[in-house]
Image: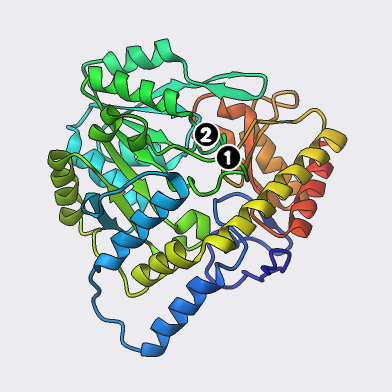
Amino acid sequence: MYDFDAIVDRRNTASLKWDVGKGELPMWVADMDFQTAPEIREALERRVKHGVFGYSVVPDEWAQAIAGWWRRRHGFEIDPGWLTFCTGAIPAISSVVRKLTTPNENVVILTPVYNIFFNSIVNNGCRALQCPLSYADGRYEIDWDDLKAKLADPQTALMILCNPHNPTGRIWERDTLARVGELCAVYGVTVISDEVHCDLTDPGFSYTPFAAASETCRDISVTCIAPTKAFNIAGLQTAAVMVPDPLLHHKVWRALNTDEVAEPNAFAIEATIAAFERGEAWLDALREYIHQNKQAAKRFLEAELPMLRLTESRATYLLWIDCSAVTDDTDALTVAIRERTGLYLSAGAQFGGNGRRFVRMNIACPRSVLMDGLERLKRAIV
């Protein structure tokens, strides 16, 4: 029904991902190479045919579509009044950091983690306080003693959680999330939960929203959600910020409006409603295709590059590859891979923690492109 094997030429389209040299293969930034769901394209085509693109408002249908999706897909009841439109998760996170901290306070992050979190923290005058995840046998876990100590620091004001976790693909269990929430509540720390990858779990696996883990988690949390990763519409700049607690909700609403990031463009609302009301079948097909890509990559690495190890992952379309048997400096390794083969991967050091021994590879692409990338990786390593 959906052709994920089709190759869409993205060169010369002002694409951040594909603005690379001739013959290079970008498999770095979290941006899929698939066309979005037909239902979303149809909604956008109808909007274009109207021909007038003035200022937009956020209709009730937007919040209802989001609430309906989380009820059906994730078993969580969202009060539409908890939601505020935002142009993206990162603008929201940066606004919340500005609003809920004073300069030089700590924001705790579980590293390795999405590198732009560092920007949202440091650019707003705060300190990124890393709580490195424990790593053993290809799996990451929270170091609870370290987390407790860093939350207990009187200078710690916020924690930014990635749920599911980018780049490791870790899905945090309900009990784990509840424990994080209880610790944060004890020390008066608010949690920003970035959940934009939540719909990209492997078939048969689901995620727990941080706010659903316990009443405590609900009351101390600011959650960023969006259709952008799952439906490949990041360029439309559409997200939602969910804050159940009334006082915290007002502060966040005020922050987003003060920073002028709470108004949609002419296409954001239509795309979001179409995704969450009519995109379910496409998304399930996509998840299965990405899962098969993961399995193909796993087989290839085990057979052809056994010195590299995949991290256990149940979410996202990103492979987090342990290269420690080859090098402890993947900054240099990724440069060499690109120079030798044109394959462009993300070096892991920028994600903090033990990332310097890893590379991140985006496999949300047709399988033929994936295999090309893996063959290039083999040529560079062997």
- Is 373 placed above or below 20 here? above
Q: Which mark is residue 171?
A: 2
> Which callout, 2 or 1, points at the residue further toward the start of the chain?
2
Query: Could you tell me how many numbered marks the image carries?
Result: 2
- Is 154 placed above or below 272 here? above
Residue at (18% x, 44% y) in the render: 249
- 53 or 225, which is in the foreground? 225
Camera-nearest label, 2 or 1: 1
Give coordinates of residue 194: x percent, y percent.
Answer: 39, 42
Residue at (44% x, 23% y) in the render: 176
- Horizontal placement of 360 versus 198: left or right? right
Q: Secondary structure at mark 2?
A: loop
Res 223 → quadrant:
top left
- 49 or 68, which is in the foreground? 68
Q: Which mark is residue 272?
A: none
Q: Three-letter amino acid code at disc 2?
A: Ile
Give coordinates of residue 120: x percent, y percent.
Answer: 33, 41
Give coordinates of residue 286: x percent, y percent.
Answer: 62, 57
CB atoms at circles 2 and 1 under 8 Å apart? Answer: yes
Q: Which residue is mark 1?
A: 205
Residue at (31% x, 82% y) in the render: 53
Measure the alpha-carbon separation of dots 2 and 1: 9 Å
Characterize the local packing of mark 1: few (<14), some (14-19) or many (20 or more) Cα atoms within 10 angstroms.
few
Give coordinates of residue 44: x percent, y percent.
Answer: 44, 77
Q: Three-letter amino acid code at disc 1?
A: Phe
Characterize the local packing of mark 2: few (<14), some (14-19) or many (20 or more) Cα atoms within 10 angstroms.
many
- Is 112 placed above or below 338 here? above
- Horizontal placement of 321 versus 273: left or right? right
Residue at (61% x, 44% y) in the render: 202
Q: Secondary structure at mark 1?
A: loop
